Image (cartoon, rainbow, N blue to C red):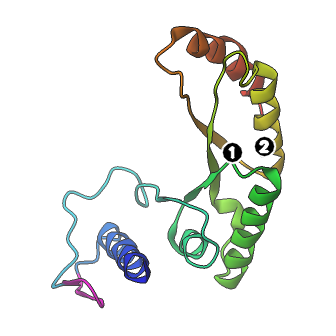
Amino acid sequence: MAERFERLEEALQIVLQMWSGKRTPYHGKYYQLEETLNSPQPLTQPHPSILIGGSGEKKTLRLVAQYADACNLFAAPGSEVLRHKLDVLKAHCEQFRRDYATIEKTTLGTVWLASGHMTVADVIAQCRLQSGLGVQQAIFNMPNVHEIAPLVTFGKEVIPAVAEL
């Protein structure tokens, strides 16, 4: 597990160096490059956004604070856990003298619009709660996505209700 995070961190350093336009060597523990060339350079400036997903407090959220433009946290554990993870991210940002506000906060959750599962009101309440914590974008998977009715309901009732959050 430690090696995976070390490799991820080196990869982040490499892409940021490549996107800077500097064609200098990179010598890490796992990767060695004579030059970090990215041609053509990306259209997005200063570089494409980096989103890191996960909620590990020691490594993942530290990498977010140090390198990422956005994070993606799991919504399932609930608002108190989500609040705690965002507080941990804030602390890492302070450590790196990074403005916490510059990181987009996103979540990954599940919406199951069906009898016996979730209602439109449940989904809207979840979005409002997350918005109140500072989450700017909620991403959902839908176990019953093969049914058209939940998608229509989501589009007609949920999206308009949460669009201004």
Classify 160 as above or below 98. above
Q: In this view, does 127 lie above or below 17?
A: above
**Callout 1 crowding tier (Cα within 10 Å): few <14, some 14–19, many ≥20:** some
User: Looking at the image, which residue is at 63% across and 41% down?
Assistant: 109
Q: Nearer the viewer, residue 143 or 140?
A: 143
Q: What element carries label 1?
A: loop
Q: Give the range drawn in magenta.
A: 24-32
Residue 16: say if magenta: no
Q: In which quarter of the image is the N terminus?
A: bottom left
Q: How far apart are marks 1 and 2 (CA)?
A: 6 Å
Q: Of the residues shown, which amino acid type is indicated by label 2?
A: Ser
Q: Circles 1 and 2: CB distance less than 8 Å?
A: yes
Residue 102 image position (x, y, % from top left): 65, 61
The C terminus, quarter of image: top right
Q: Which mark is residue 136?
A: 1
- Residue 110 at x, y percent in the picture: 62, 36
Q: Residue at x 58, y 58 (%)?
A: 71
Can you tell which mark lies on residue 131? 2
Q: Nearer the viewer, residue 124 or 66?
A: 124
